[in-house]
Amino acid sequence: MSILVNKETRVVVQGFTGKEGSFHAQQCLEYGTHIVGGVTPGKGGQTHLGLPVFDTVSQAVKATGATVSMVFVPPAFVADAVMEAADAGISLAVIITEGAPVRDMQMAKAYATKQGMKTIGPNCPGIITAGECKIGIMPGAIFQKGSVGLISKSGTLTYEGANQVCKEGFGISTAVGIGGDPIIGLSYKELLPMFEVDPQTQAIVLIGEIGGDLEIQAAAFIKENITKPVVAFIAGQSAPKGKRMGHAGAIVSGSAGTAAEKMEALRAAGVTVVQSPADIGKKIAEVLNKR
Amino acid sequence: MNIHEYQAKEIFRRFGVPVPKGYIAFTVEEAVANAKKLGGLVWVVKAQIHAGGRGLGGGVKLARSLDEVKAHAQAILGMTLVTHQTGPQGKVVGKVYIEEGVDIADELYLGIVLDRAKEMPVMMASTEGGMEIEKVAATSPEKIIKVAIDPSIGFQGYHGRELAFGLGLPKEHMSAFVKFASALYALYMQNDGEMIEINPLVKTGAGEFIALDAKMSFDDSALSRHPDVAAMRDITEEDPAEREAGEFGLSYVKLDGSVGCMVNGAGLAMGTMDTINYVGGTPANFLDVGGGANAQTVAKGFEIILKDPNVKSIFVNIFGGIVRCDRIANGILEATKLVDVSVPVVVRLDGTNAQEAATILKQANIANIITARDLEDGAKKAVAAAKGENA
C-alpha cells in the first residue's frame, strides 16, 4: 500500500515535449511510472518517447484513461494547464513548475477544488511511491521501499530526509514534496490522514519551513487525529525576519511564521522535533525501534 | 518587488484612489520648484526609501514656507536614514517627495495582503492610523477589522460596508469609503500586488478619504506581465551582493556569522544554516545555487561569499539528485581554479554517485578542501575550520 499513487496509476504529462518535460518523463519511465502519453497543444498525433502526444488533456484522458497529470508547463501558462486538467476529469495534478504567479495559482486551485481535482505543488519535486511510481523530478534511486511516509515543503530536504531514513534501514512508503509557494495544493493536514490509514506507513517525517501557518495547522491536526509517530524538522530557525529565503513562501512576516512557534506547536502535539535535519534518520530509528 | 511611496501613488492615481498632489525631486532646487508648482501654504518633504518608520527617523518634515522646504530638502537629501526597518546601517536618501499639505480630521489604516490560510486576499482596516499594524495586532487585535475577498466574486459593496461599519464611520461617509476600498482592491489584483499598506489613510474635514502614505509590493513571479511596474524597480535599494547573485540565478541573503554556506535547494540551505548553529557555529549567509550546480555557478557562489570579510570557512553542502555528484565535484575543482578561495572549504556531496565524487576530490589533493561524509560531519568541520581549529 501507499498513498495517492502506485504502480497502477496512469499518468499523462502536460508540457511533454519541452526540454524539462521530456527529460523528467524519461526518468519517470525508467523508474517504472506508468506514463500513458503527453499533451502539447499543436503536436497532437505525434509520438514522443514512444508514447502518444495529444493536443488537449481531454483527448488524452479519453484515449488513455489517465487519472493523474504531471505538469511541466512554463509559469505563465501553468494555471491554464491545471484548470484544463481539472476540466478533463484528472483527479490529481502534480505541478512541478517553479515561478507561477500567486494570483494564477489561487484561481487554479479554487477551480480544481470545485472540480474535485487534487493538486500537489507548484514549485515542488512531486510525489513518489517507492519502487512503484515516481511523478516528479526527485532522484528515484534514493527512495527505497519501506515504512516511512514523508511530507516536505523542500525538494532537497525531501532527498536528505529520505536518504537518512533509508540508510537507517527503514525505507519510504510514499514521499510528497508539497512545495514552498504561498499557495499550494495538498498540504500536511490533507496528507497526514492518508498516511494514518495507510497500513504500509509506520511513521511519518514532516519537513516544514518558516512562513505561513500550515505547520501550525498540522500540529493541531496531529494532536487530535494522528496515532503514528511523527518526526519533524522546521527549516529556517536561523533565518532573519522579513527576508525571503529562496522559496516564495519562506518569509517571516512580522512575528508570524517563525520556526520557533512552529516547533513549539508540533512539540505540544507530541511530535518529535529535531533541531537539525541531520537528526531525522536517527530519530525515525528511535521512534520505530521503540514500538 | 518593493516600490517607493511616490511610485505607489502614481499607480493609485491611475486607478482613481485619491492621493495628495506631489512631485518627486532629486535635488534641493527641484524640491523648491515642486513646492512652487504645488502652490498652497503647507508642504511635506518626504524621504523616499524602501522602509517604513521614515517619520520617526527624521525623514518626513512639514514646511510652512519655501525656505523651510529648501532647508528640509537640504537636510534630508543625502542623509543616512535609520528606521526600525533599515537595520542599524540605515539607508542613504537619494530623492524626496514634495507633497501638498492635507487637512487631517482622522487617521485610519487600510491594507491588503494575501491570506495564505484562506487562499484569498484579505483587506484590513483599523482606527489606529499611524501606528504600526503589527503592534496593534499584538496589543489590541479587536481594533483590526478583516474581510477576505474571494476573487471569483471580486470586491462587493458588503465588503466595504463591513469595514466601514467596523471602523465606526458615519453613514454619510460610507459610500466614499466603499469606493476608495473598491478601487484599491482593483489595483491590487490588476497589478499582481503582494501587499498594499496605507498608513495613515486620512479622512479630511470634508469627509474625503486620501492615502497620505502608500506602500506597495508585487509578486515577483508576475512582473513579466507588468512592464510598467517592473520599470519602477530601484536597484539602489537592493543589497549589491544579493542583486549580483540574482543575476546569476543564485539566491543569496547575507547574515553576520563566519561560516559561508553554498547549498542546493532553499530548504536544505536553511537546514544547513540551522545545523551550523546547532553545532555551535554561526552561518555567514543563505545561498541556494539551485538545481543545476555547475562550475560557473559554484565559482560565482565562492566569489559572492568571499566578498564578506567575516567568512572564515565555507561549507559546500550539495545533495546530488538528478545532477550527479561526480560532476559537481569536478565543478568545484574547476571553480577553485577560477576563483582564489582563500579559506578552508568543507565539501559534503551526497546522493547519486557520491562515492565517485569523494574519490575525485581526494585525488585532486587540494590543501584547503576538506571532505565530509554527511551533513552534521560537514557542519562540524566547517565550524571548527572557521574557529581556526583542525577538524
Image (spheres, coloured by chain):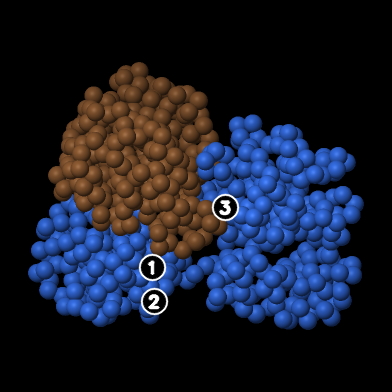
Chain colours: A brown, B blue
Mark 3 lies on a secondary structure that is strand
Q: Determine the residue positioned at 24% across, 60% down.
A: B375
Write down the residue under mark 2.
Answer: B308
In which chain is the residue bearing label 3? Answer: B
Q: Can you name the residue that lies furthest to the top here?
A: A62
The amino acid beneath tag 2 is: Asp
Do the residues indicated by labels 1 and 2 lie within the same chain of the protein?
yes
In the figure, is residue B61 to the left or right of A246? right
**Mark 3 closeness class: few <14, some 14–19, many ≥20 residues within 10 Å:** many
Can you say which quadrant of the picture contains the N terminus of chain B?
bottom right
Question: Quick check: can you spot residue B64?
Answer: yes
**Mark 1 closeness class: few <14, some 14–19, many ≥20 residues within 10 Å:** many
Distance from Cα at disc 1 to Cα at disc 3 = 25 Å
Write down the residue under mark 1.
Answer: B285
Residue B173 drawn above or below residue A57: below
Distance from Cα at disc 2 to Cα at disc 3 = 29 Å
Residue B138 drawn above or below residue A108: below
In the figure, is residue B152 to the left or right of A123? right
| Residue B218, numbered circle | 3
User: Do residues under tags 1 and 2 come within 8 Å of each other at their CB atoms?
Assistant: yes
- Residue B195 screen position, x and y as percent: 60, 51
- Residue B363 screen position, x and y as percent: 9, 69
The amino acid beneath tag 1 is: Asn
- Residue B92 screen position, x and y as percent: 60, 76
Which label sits in the foreground, 1 or 3? Answer: 1
In this rendered view, identify the residue nearer to me: A271 or B330: A271
Point out the tag, 2 or 3, that comes first from the N-terminus: 3
User: Do residues under tags 1 and 3 come within 8 Å of each other at their CB atoms?
Assistant: no
